[in-house]
Amino acid sequence: MISFTLNGRTVETDATATTRLLDFLREELGLIGTKEGCGEGECGACSVFVNSLLQNSCLIPIGSISGAHIQTIEGIMDTEQFKILDEYYSLAGGVQCGYCIPGMVMASAALLSNNPQPTEEEIREGISGNLCRCTGYNMIVDAINLAAKKGDGIWQKK
């Protein structure tokens, strides 16, 4: 039996230990905010937090997360940080098709939690593991920059 905490709730499963976390989230739990882009850990569409660290869920066998704390985009949607990111991604035009956005928002939250006032270069580096084919990075960088200014003081990890 594999047991872990997902978005604040205990999950127990007898899934095969080699099942990818991405597949388990989407197919078994219906958490479809986490997307599969490349399936090779290159695009960031499947980003989740594992014990507060940004990880690509397409590379994680579920057997390796026993006892871990996992947080998906669905798990951060009620936070003040998400509300600020959501507002400024919209205002800056940082969302078009939306496919990459859950992973991009997770990367943005990770960046701002570790560096609440990043420079443009630090923002670009912070999202460098996430690919976007539609929006273009300038608007996403603008959104993160605005969110950093608006959310000053709420980004520190608790």
Image (spheres, grey):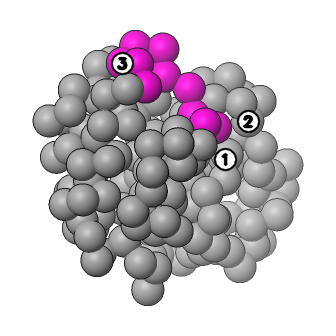
- Please identify the residue farthest to the bottom as the structure is shown: 158
Instruction: Indicate left or right for 62 with 126 as reference.
Output: right
Under mark 2, the amino acid is Gly
Name the residue tied to disc 3: 135
Q: Which mark is residue 109?
A: none
Q: Are marks 2 and 1 in contact (CB under 8 Å)?
A: no
Residue 134 among those drawn in magenta? yes
Q: Which residue, given by chain and number where applicable, does mark 2 sit on?
A: 41
Q: Point out the frontmost of discs 2 and 1.
A: 2
Q: Secondary structure at mark 1?
A: helix
Q: How many marks?
A: 3
x, y percentage for residue 156?
41, 78
Q: Is residue 85 above or below residue 101?
A: below
Instruction: Pick the residue in front: 54 or 146.
Output: 146
Judge whether residue 55 can be spotted in this image: yes
**Please, what is the three-letter code of the amino acid marked with disc 1?**
Ser
Classify residue 74 by image quadrant.
bottom left
How crowded pointer 2 is (Cα within 10 Å; few <14, some 14-19, many 20+) is rated as: some
Above or below for 107 versus 2? above
Q: Nearer the viewer, residue 39 or 145?
A: 145
Placement of the N terminus among the 4 image quadrants? bottom right
**Which residue lies under the disc numbered 1?**
57
Q: Is residue 26 left or right of residue 75?
A: right
- Residue 30 shows up from this direction: no
How far across and down, in percent of the image, does residue 103 sit? 49, 41
